[in-house]
Amino acid sequence: MELREIVEILDRRYPPHLAEDWDRVGLSVGDPKAAVTKVLFAVDPILAVADEAIASGAQLLVSVHPLLLRGVHSVVADTTKGAVVHRLIGAGVALYTAHTNADAVLGGVAEALARAVGLEETTPLIPHPEEPTLGIGRVGLLPKALPLGDFAQGVADAVPSTAQGVRVAGDLDLKVRKVAVLAGSGDKFFDAVREADADVYVTADLRHHPALEARERALLGDGRPALVDLSHYASEGVWLRSAADDLAAAAPVEAIVSAIRTDPWTARLGGLDS
Amino acid sequence: MELREIVEILDRRYPPHLAEDWDRVGLSVGDPKAAVTKVLFAVDPILAVADEAIASGAQLLVSVHPLLLRGVHSVVADTTKGAVVHRLIGAGVALYTAHTNADAVLGGVAEALARAVGLEETTPLIPHPEEPTLGIGRVGLLPKALPLGDFAQGVADAVPSTAQGVRVAGDLDLKVRKVAVLAGSGDKFFDAVREADADVYVTADLRHHPALEARERALLGDGRPALVDLSHYASEGVWLRSAADDLAAAAPVEAIVSAIRTDPWTARLGGLDS
Amino acid sequence: MELREIVEILDRRYPPHLAEDWDRVGLSVGDPKAAVTKVLFAVDPILAVADEAIASGAQLLVSVHPLLLRGVHSVVADTTKGAVVHRLIGAGVALYTAHTNADAVLGGVAEALARAVGLEETTPLIPHPEEPTLGIGRVGLLPKALPLGDFAQGVADAVPSTAQGVRVAGDLDLKVRKVAVLAGSGDKFFDAVREADADVYVTADLRHHPALEARERALLGDGRPALVDLSHYASEGVWLRSAADDLAAAAPVEAIVSAIRTDPWTARLGGLDS
Amino acid sequence: MELREIVEILDRRYPPHLAEDWDRVGLSVGDPKAAVTKVLFAVDPILAVADEAIASGAQLLVSVHPLLLRGVHSVVADTTKGAVVHRLIGAGVALYTAHTNADAVLGGVAEALARAVGLEETTPLIPHPEEPTLGIGRVGLLPKALPLGDFAQGVADAVPSTAQGVRVAGDLDLKVRKVAVLAGSGDKFFDAVREADADVYVTADLRHHPALEARERALLGDGRPALVDLSHYASEGVWLRSAADDLAAAAPVEAIVSAIRTDPWTARLGGLDS
Amino acid sequence: MELREIVEILDRRYPPHLAEDWDRVGLSVGDPKAAVTKVLFAVDPILAVADEAIASGAQLLVSVHPLLLRGVHSVVADTTKGAVVHRLIGAGVALYTAHTNADAVLGGVAEALARAVGLEETTPLIPHPEEPTLGIGRVGLLPKALPLGDFAQGVADAVPSTAQGVRVAGDLDLKVRKVAVLAGSGDKFFDAVREADADVYVTADLRHHPALEARERALLGDGRPALVDLSHYASEGVWLRSAADDLAAAAPVEAIVSAIRTDPWTARLGGLDS
Amino acid sequence: MELREIVEILDRRYPPHLAEDWDRVGLSVGDPKAAVTKVLFAVDPILAVADEAIASGAQLLVSVHPLLLRGVHSVVADTTKGAVVHRLIGAGVALYTAHTNADAVLGGVAEALARAVGLEETTPLIPHPEEPTLGIGRVGLLPKALPLGDFAQGVADAVPSTAQGVRVAGDLDLKVRKVAVLAGSGDKFFDAVREADADVYVTADLRHHPALEARERALLGDGRPALVDLSHYASEGVWLRSAADDLAAAAPVEAIVSAIRTDPWTARLGGLDS
């Protein structure tokens, strides 16, 4: 099948207009007329993943994160972005990105994370203005209320393992049932989480100041929402298998999932609980 | 001693003009004519720390982080900032902040962190334009080269413990000798670290994308710099004891250090090495 | 009654969404859980008014002007804003502001001024986009046409006296019947006044250039609108009594009006007519 | 003499580079090759003043305020600016403006006002960055200290009379000796006045909020600076006579002063002291 | 007839609200009460054209281009804009501009160009948002397809001659039938031309980079659209005759067309085809 | 020789810091470790030129214009920029740009144009702030004064021929001796040309409004500067031969010049002088 036909299938599945304004999705490397028989799905289009795609015989890499989110004026091979561009073009491998649009759709990244942590009856955390059944993040209910510590341990067991593990903030005995999830960096969405009246917010890449401010606000009230912070990679990696299966069902291609853990951290040391 | 005199002493020790443009340092709550006999030092001016100051009998809280970094139009007591303002004014406790200016000075936050990780002969990572012996962060040498894993374990042992512990990125056997340290959020300073030709960068609050991009660039070369990521609180908390001692030596006041760990995280679960 | 309940009553009477975008209204100092039995109404929340509130036994000061219109990063007691914050919090007095929203409502500041100058059948000078029966300023008719000089003398008699008095621009024999009023600074609203085809514009705080330009435009035509310029304080102070009565009718509190004239001017000397 | 030669003389006397960035000074109407024998000096280039210039036989009008401070896209004769342009061009009268540059020079507007209120040994309130003996406003000493009330009465007697007269804020018995003067709108210069440690600030066009805030700051201290507020026209009109004499001494032209009071106010009514 | 009546007629024919936001149309010089019996139409209101208007006895000049597109702070007679203002006012000649609004209307500039190049059944290239039958540029069909070279020669024959002639880009044998025309600078409208699926784009003032980029895009496809680039003057001058006739039919005035070619170029030398 | 060494040689010859802020110069495609034996010089890095480089056996294309002046988020092969990137990377050809920095240096683009039109003793038209002997454009003298028509004919004969030829504005008998030249788009530099007191300005890509305004200003004076407008391509193409020779002298590579005329225009028709 020609790459342009695969792109049409992917664009229907992950409509580009659902992406955030700042996002850059869709095809960014490759010749639309090239033939595609094998596709690799990964979170980050880093050099090791490009090499994995080439080694696997894929002609298309589908990533969650854009390669060229910031516009580039050079693709020279001794820059990180340029190295990937040279490697992919030299080997005839294309790159397609589905990011915030893949989060928004039914059966996308946000719902994959919601399913992984055990939610039912989910609705978007931030509904898309024109298509309110779609949107960023999800809010849903656990089948029954659990202590925060048990819930967080379940999350840690359900998502891809990384060196940093899962961080929890809040009283570990707090009973949680209503859960907000947001794959990727969650710093900017606390207002929506509070408005959703969630008991706990599962997200990634939280920084000190937003997390501390959120805890301060929670402690002025009843202590909710508690926080569960994953590695950014893990929060989005939960989606790759179903995304690959979706494509394989819709097009005559083989669809595989990257074996590379693109979380940057090698190890974790110290810590109160170590 | 009157608060205004303490403020003068602190302003000489941590000159406000050394602070970054976006920062907000100096006295932000209190009556300059009030008497001060006891001072509490802390990283974050949160409500629990305000209560600790009041309970301790201090009339002045010195914090690393500003309370009102973003301008406020209200200090109502059911907001996090307003609650602290009401609590402090109601109890007659003042608030003074030394932040990026405390990082810049000799014997300040950056040097406290450099000393904690074992550096000698330090110079600023980003020299102040007009006073180049001062500045943000520090670069220095370990007495002898160490494997990255051993170095990181030493850092984890030297800084205040937190639930999240210390994250390491890089080959754990890489020999490191030249070290860049930057207390607080380190995302924006990778260019300076590379220019300093550091073997390893010790900082805090690194996020997925900057850390991964930094590792990609390192891997296009010889793998350096490796990364050691602390909790934001720990990276700055190392300074509190010496800051309190400095003030007690300069003014007739008792200077104590907060016993509250203001890192927001309660626990950490899962992880490859758990 | 708890402060939070009084705030709810005031927010219903002066809906915050009617305020201009740049304005800062609502509660800005105080603990919503505190009890309130007495309320002082004033134009400007200056230190003398804060002291008056404290001395009167009020637990709430309601002002026309915001205390913290520009965001603050410090409330230190040797600044004007910080002194008021310290004084109020120290004495347990809250501060609530109703400003451009109090102008917009039926029976608010603009209508109090319109009534004071003798208007009937008033409509908003600048209707609120979504609620056009509300809005900034008012336009209405005098019961019968008057010479400008007589009308202006009547205005001077009707509003709170100040050192600066009332300024008039235009032919004192001009017959006026249609009147536009706008409490507070009127410089920016001449287009609306002309569009309303008013014979005279009663407002405050007009400056040389806008007033002269408006007179030039009038003189290219038939000399209308004439101008009547009050002190800013007087133009808004006409509202305080009815505002206090409104609250006393709606809540079990005593509501009093400040006795302090907050116009900054002590005296006025010279002048052609002195 | 040709207009271009008069312009050269005026440009030397009032160097355009001394004007503020936002200001628009110099020749704005007229043909540089026209002959000039008579010149009219005025504060505001309004239509009545243009007619006065024509009637007087002048070929040049010199004004303090620019006609086209905001750029125009049309000079149609039914607009205020266009009417003046048509009237002047039709009658062969040129327009030259010396505004903030006329304030800055030795013997300019600021010094004329300083002299009128009785100051000696004046220096600029806001020195010009590159020529610090010149600049905006002046600070100087009275020959001896006076009660504020007496000083203000003297100012009212010394400047051109207008309907609005002179407003005073402060304790009328306060002894004043050091005086800051600034002709035109004085709202933005309170910091400089305080830095100059002036006892009283004589300026024009002060509005409620800046004046009240300045009084609040004064009352947190020793009550200084007091304020004396003139009409904008009067604060600059004091300069016209000496400016006309200067030109007549430098060029073979007759130089006269406008008889029109361009303050917009016709009358003043009410007031505590009336 | 009074000028104000002529302006009303012209404003109805070329409604100002159809002009682009950045444009400045309508009356810009003149007294609305003046009498008008003769009108000169021209593309550019330059000094030679102003003199032509005066010499012809016209009291009104109607131009395509605004005189004061950028706001002016001076109309001194030794500047290009000021010289025209002085010349026109001195001779009692008004200036009215119909520019992008004259392009938008039925029978306006765009349609005059479309008619000149032989189009039928035209629709706007960029429809006006609220009145989609009007708008900038036109798209239409030739009666039958022509080789590009023949079409371009016909265009060159149909528009006013200038030194620079007509430039063509594309295969001269390409058959063209669907044509987009846009009078004036056409650099910014290539997207609309491609969306309209035009075979050739007739416009003016194209620069190297936009033209080369447009050709590159065309060559990635089937070579369309070809480009035909006129002088800016010629592209708008085709309208003058019909505009003058329109006014003469609607008002009791004589309407004539300028005989001055306002293209700035005197000659053209060299060139491959010379 | 490795590409990185060629880049070092070119960067010394055309220092990147001499480029304008908005410009994007240096290596933008290629692997710095690749070997280079042959280099093609061209004005525009369009697809036909990329193909010419590949066909010629060159491993490096040096262009005047940047390929990615505006940052790109995609290099897909069906876009004009992406097609060139794919073509070059696929064939192992690098791209290096020397643009405004090549204009600034001694012996660069501006001097090549100055030499071509016969100038001696040239100095920069707009000197570089820190290196005033370098800079954009050049001003110089002809050996003796010539009529404008003769001079322009000489220019037309000296630069690469294009369909559009050379346009001239001004009296063809005007004697010209002092000449300003600026390769590329010259619209923004008229102030510098007038300040240099040049008799004629030789540049490219002039548009109607700037050229007409410049002529109006000239005609208010003595008619100077006249204008000579080249095709953008021709104004920069004069440099290619010497640039290639420079590199061949400095590095062990073959350096050739593109045979493709990248001016977008195919033909020119009509015109007064045709």
Image: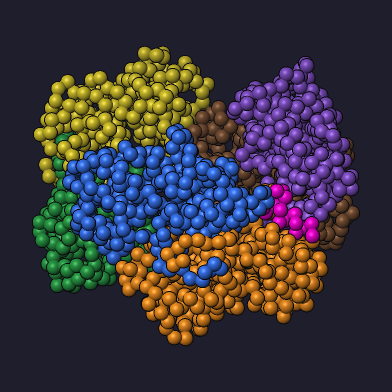
Chain colours: A orange, B blue, C green, D yellow, E brown, F purple
Q: Is residue C110 visible?
A: no
Q: Can residue F121 be seen in this view?
A: yes
Number of dots carrying numbers: 0
Q: Where is residue B156 in the image (x, y as percent from the top left)?
A: 47, 56
On the picture, is D215 further left or further right than E92?
left
Observer-nearest residue: B161 or E152? B161
Classify the position of the N terminus of chain A by image quarter. Answer: bottom right
What predominant SS class does the magenta segment belong to?
A: helix
Residue at x-position 36% and y-position 63%: C127
Task: Work out whether F10 lies above or below E142.
Answer: above
Observer-nearest residue: B149 or D64? B149
Task: Work out whether C194 lies above or below E86.
Answer: below
Observer-nearest residue: C7 or A6? A6
| Residue B203 colored in magenta in the image | no
Corner quadrant of residue F236: top right
| Residue A87 colored in magenta in the image | yes
Q: Where is residue C4 in the image (x, y as percent from the top left)?
A: 24, 69
Residue at x-position 79% and y-position 72%: A37
Residue at x-position 13% and y-position 65%: C38
Residue at x-position 13% and y-position 30%: D175
Corner quadrant of residue E263: top right
Magenta range is A75-91
Task: Work out whether A148 lies above or below B188.
Answer: below
